[in-house]
Amino acid sequence: MHPYKRSQRLSILLREEIADIIMRRVKDPRIGFVTVTDVELSEDLKIAKIFISVLNEEDKDTTLEILNSAKGLVRSEISKRVRVKFIPAIEFRIDKSIEHGDRIDRLLREIKKKESSED
C-alpha cells in the first residue's frame, strides 16, 4: 500500500516531466529561467495546475503567455512519457508563494530591527 494518494504521486512525476519538457522541447528564445515549483492535480486527475517561478520579474507575463500557447506540445509530450488513462488538461500559473515568503521574511527582519533599536 502506498503511503499517499495517486494524485500526489502523479503530480510529482508530472512536475519532473514538465520541467524537462519546458527545458528541452519548448524552443522560444524569450523564455528565460523557468522553474516548475508545483503541480496540483484535481482529485479526478482531469486538471493539472502547474505553478512556475520565473527569475526575471519583467518576464513573467511573457513566459506565462508562451507556456500557455505551448500547452498542446506539453500535453502531447506528457502522453508519450507518462502512462495514464487520461492526460490532464494543463493550466500554467505563476507561483506566488516565493513572493509571499519573501514578504514575510522582510516583515520579520523589520520587527527584529525595531526590537533591537528599542533595547
Image (cartoon, rainbow, N blue to C red):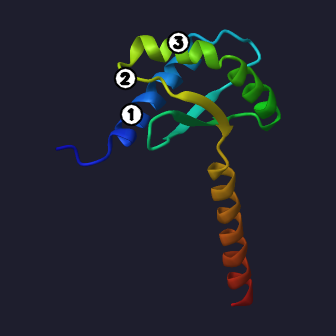
Earlier-in-chain disc, 1 versus 3: 1
Q: CA distance from mark 2 to mark 3?
A: 12 Å
Residue visible at 54% across and 18% down?
A: 75
Q: As shown in the figure, which amino acid type bears the numbered disc 2?
A: Val
Residue 104, percent from left and from top: 66, 65
Residue 67, percent from left and from top: 68, 23
Residue located beneath label 3 in the image:
76
In this rendered view, identify the residue nearer to me: 47 or 101: 47
Numbered label tally: 3
Circle 2 SS class? loop
Residue located beneath label 1 in the image:
10
Q: Could you classify mark 2 by the number of other residues whose Cα lies within 10 Å: few (under 14), some (14-19), or many (20 or more)?
A: few
Q: CA distance from mark 1 to mark 2?
A: 9 Å
Using the rendered view, name the quadrant where residue 79 is placed: top left
Residue located beneath label 2 in the image:
84
Using the rendered view, name the quadrant where residue 70 is placed: top right
Residue visible at 24% across and 48% down?
A: 3
Q: CA distance from mark 1 to mark 3?
A: 16 Å
Q: Is residue 32 left or right of residue 72?
A: right
Earlier-in-chain disc, 1 versus 2: 1
Q: Give the answer, above or below, for where 112 lies relative to 39.
A: below
In this rendered view, identify the residue nearer to me: 45 or 49: 45
Residue at the bottom extreme of this rendering: 119
